[in-house]
Amino acid sequence: MAFSCGRLSTLSASVLAIFSIASPMFAADPASRSTSPTSISSTSSFPAAAELVAAASKEPSLTPQAASAGHDGKRFFIDDGSGNRLTFSGVIQFRYQATIRNAPAPIPSDPDLADQDPKDFTHGFSNRRVRLGAQGTIQKDTTYRIEIDFAGGPANLIDSAITHNLGKGLSIRAGQFKLPFLREEIISHTVQLATDRSLVNTVFTLDISPAISLDWKNDTYRASFSFNDGGGVNNTYYDNPREADWALTGRIERAITGPWSQSEQFTSWIGDPFALYLGAAGHAQQGGDTGSITGATNDVDFYGFTGDIMLKGNGWNAFAAVVGRTSQISSGDVSDYGLLLQTGAFVAEQHELFARYALIVPDTDRSTDDAFHEVIFGHNYYISPKSHVAKLTTEVVWFPGDQAGSASLIKENANRGFLNSDEPNEVTLRIQLQAVF
């Protein structure tokens, strides 16, 4: 690879300037060391550096002054001044959970547990999320993002996507990312009202998948259409039997009033204007007709739909969503449904109260088909006003139903504060401290 004279001059100037700055700092006589601030333009102690810097300055895009690094108010960054920018981000969510339930009896076949009495109280600390991310821009029109989670064991790749801006609000994205289906899933975990998403989201989410997506947006509408490997198959090889033969996901949204930036979180700060957003999405996937490492992909077809509405005002917010899914499996077709209602309001500048109700209705043809409910009441204390960078959330989660009667869809999920129980009325207290950087 050939280097231009300008690039060589720039590199030489940078090296020589560093030596010109460092030489008085490492002088043998401490008294001769300068205590005044220095910069790359301080070349008086090395005249040759001044000449090279002057030569390099004839190519402005390559001058050292064009590059910068620091904190832009949101993230730490490195910028070369020519359209290439790299930023770093991260989140820590540390929580305490305590659950009261009617614990099921120990497994009789396990000799170590057979003589133990079931324990109805379970509590402890955990790291829910410990994530590091990097995102940036290549020549202004191409962006990238990588996010890794270190909580709960070995590092796990969450997102890895490249997006290219095609102009006029149109872009194309490729990689592993959240599919454009449930609005609750799309909104970041750092800006939820509660410590975690609802059980409706747990049951019906498509989560993350390797995909290609075509995205479009203007001031009133935005849409996303994705060709992908199917729901919940992140970090898999292409011959994994969990991958669909094909899968398509599409979502469209309308901003009745308010900017799109206001729809990226559930919280509405005191002083925010009224905003109203509508959304709808659909998904279809088919399996069983292409090869995999086990012979064929899983023979499961399913189709899903969802619709949602978000309202935001001066210190208050409300959100509602419905979702349905029909699965075609060997034993027949089953259709399941979910409902989510959520609201929040500030009672002081840094104190927000919120409530959530989630309903899951299994198909009556399932072996266990009882409807299941989730109710949450909570409080957010924004340590940094009007920001999620430091937040303390306290909430009480109540599960009125009997998990055994809904076991075909509702599974134990410690992250959601839900453990197996023989009786209704399981209650969990969650306290979470969040830091975002």
Image: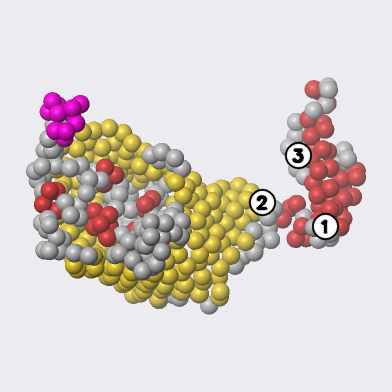
Q: Nearer the viewer, mark 1 or mark 2?
A: 1
Nearer the camera: disc 1 or disc 3: 1
In the picture of the structure, the residue carrying the numbered disc 2 is 68
Q: Which residue shows up at 69% across the image and 61% down it?
A: 82
C-alpha separation, residue under disc 1 versus residue under disc 3: 29 Å
Q: Earlier in the sequence, mark 3 or mark 2?
A: 3
Q: Residue at x 44, y 59 (%)?
A: 239
Q: Position of residue 302 (x, y in %)?
A: 28, 68
Residue 254: say if magenta. Answer: no
Residue that numbered label 3 is attached to? 38
Region of the chain picked out in magenta, as a range? 106-117
Nearer-the-camera pick, 254 or 213:
213
Q: Give the Cα separation between the discs numbered 3 and 2.
A: 16 Å
Residue 370: where, in percent of width, then height? 10, 56
Q: Amino acid at mark 3?
A: Thr
Q: Which residue is mark 1?
A: 3
The answer to whether one can see residue 264 in this image is no
Where does the image place residue 342, in percent across and percent down from the top left? 23, 58
Q: Position of 431 compared to 25: left or right? A: left
- Dot 2 falls on a residue whose secondary structure is strand
- Residue 119, by quadrant, is top left
Of pointers 1 and 3, the one earlier in the residue sequence: 1
N-terminal of the two: label 1 or label 2? 1
The residue shown at (36%, 69%) is 289
- Please provide percent x and percent y for residue 109: 16, 33
Depth check: give the residue in front, 86 or 286: 286
Name the residue located 46 percent from the left edge and 60 percent from the top edge.
238
